[in-house]
Every structure is written in structure tokens, then in C-alpha cells.
Amino acid sequence: MKASNTKKAASWSDVKARLTHFDNDGLVGLLHDLYTASKDNRVFLHARFGLGKDVLAPYKATINRWLWPDMFKNQNASVAEAKKSIANYKKAIGHSDGMAELMVFYCECASGFSVEVGLQDEGFFVPLVRMFEQALQAIARLPQGQRPLLMERLKLVHHISQNIGYGVDDAMSDLLVEYGTYD
């Protein structure tokens, strides 16, 4: 009879326990290896430590890639990948102004692409409206001085989205009224 394999899968607790055996040089070496292992790790560390001119740039590039794909290169759109970029930024640093900026940028890309190509995909529009609401919520949490520019950009998204259909314009109008920002 064969013995059953009772080993459990490795977890964060196991990794954390091993880290206690590292000295400073060992931890720096480990971080170096992670840094060189993938672009996503580099982006994360740059954001976490505030390195580079614009830590939002790689996150915006990912959002733009997935919400405004190059149709001539047979690229597909992916709401999930675009939203994942925002989640990754939140894990890396999650500053409220950066979160609001990425959410507004998401809305700009999604609405712009939809109008440009005449997209007719409810699976694309429902997440757009949800992100529009999340952007409104994120902007409301910012200091008063940081709100106007982001709100103007969201209002432009609303204006552009009037041509989409599928109730997107009505839903955005209702949200603007609900958040007291409708002119």
C-alpha cells in the first residue's frame, strides 16, 4: 500500500518563517532577485518606494492597453486586466489621489474606445458605470483642492458616453445627481 502524501501546500506563513533567517544582505539579495524576475515586480517596487518620474505611468499603460486595444494588431479588450492594474497599484501603494486618477483614466479609456469603435458590448459598459461610481467615491474622499480637475474629466466621460447607449448615459447622470455633482 502506498503512503498518502500529507504535505500541505506552502503558504505565506511558511515564507515568513523562512525570512526570519535572512540577514540584511540576504533580504536585499532576495529583493534584487524578485526585482529582476519580472516587470510587474519592478513596477510594484517603484510605486512602493516612489521611484521614477511618474509611478502611475505603467499602471496607466496597462489600463490603456486593455481598454483601448489596437484593433489592427488583433488585440482584445479585457476589463479584468484593466481592473487588475488598479488593484496592483492599490497593493503597491494605494495613495487615494493615485487611485482616483487611475479610476478616472479607466473611465476615459473605456468610454473613448467605445465611442471610437462603436462598441456594442454590455459586458464592457456595466463595469464602466461601476468604475464611474467608484471614481466619484474616490474623488469625494480627496481634499477639496484635488477634486475639480478629476470631476471635470469625469463629466467629460459622461458627455462622451451619451453616444454609447445601453443606458450608460442615464446611469452616469443618476450617479452625478446622487453625488451632487450634476450641472
Image (cartoon, rainbow, N blue to C red):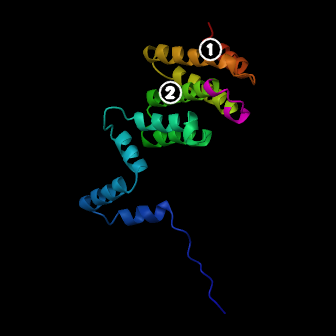
**Which of the image's four quarters has the C terminus?**
top right
Which residue corresponds to mark 2?
100
Residue shown at 50% from the left, 27% from the top = 100
Give the left or right position of residue 154, taking residue 101 as reference: right
- Residue 180: which quarter of the image? top right
Quadrant of the frame with the N terminus: bottom right
Pick the residue in front: 96 or 106. 106
Horizontally, residue 51 falls left or right of residue 163, namely: left
Query: In the picture, residue 176 is in which quadrant?
Result: top right
The relative height of residue 58 versus residue 96 in the rendered view (above or below) is below
Q: Secondary structure at mark 1?
A: helix
Q: Which mark is residue 148?
A: none
Q: Amino acid at mark 2?
A: Ala
Callout 1 amino acid: His
Image spot of residue 174 (x, y percent)? 70, 17
Q: Residues within 10 Å of mark 1 (few under 14, many from 20)?
A: some
Q: Nearer the viewer, mark 1 or mark 2?
A: 1
Which residue is depicted at the point 43% across and 42% down? 92
117 in the magenta segment: yes
Q: Are marks 1 and 2 in contact (CB under 8 Å)?
A: no
Q: Residue at x 56, y 37 (%)?
A: 72
Q: Which element carries disc 2, helix, strand or loop?
A: helix
Expressed as whole percent of the image width and height from the top left, the position of residue 181 reads: 60, 12
Residue range corresponding to the magenta coloring: 116-124
- The residue labelled by disc 1 is 159
At which x and y percent is residue 74?
58, 42
Q: CA distance from mark 1 to mark 2?
A: 19 Å
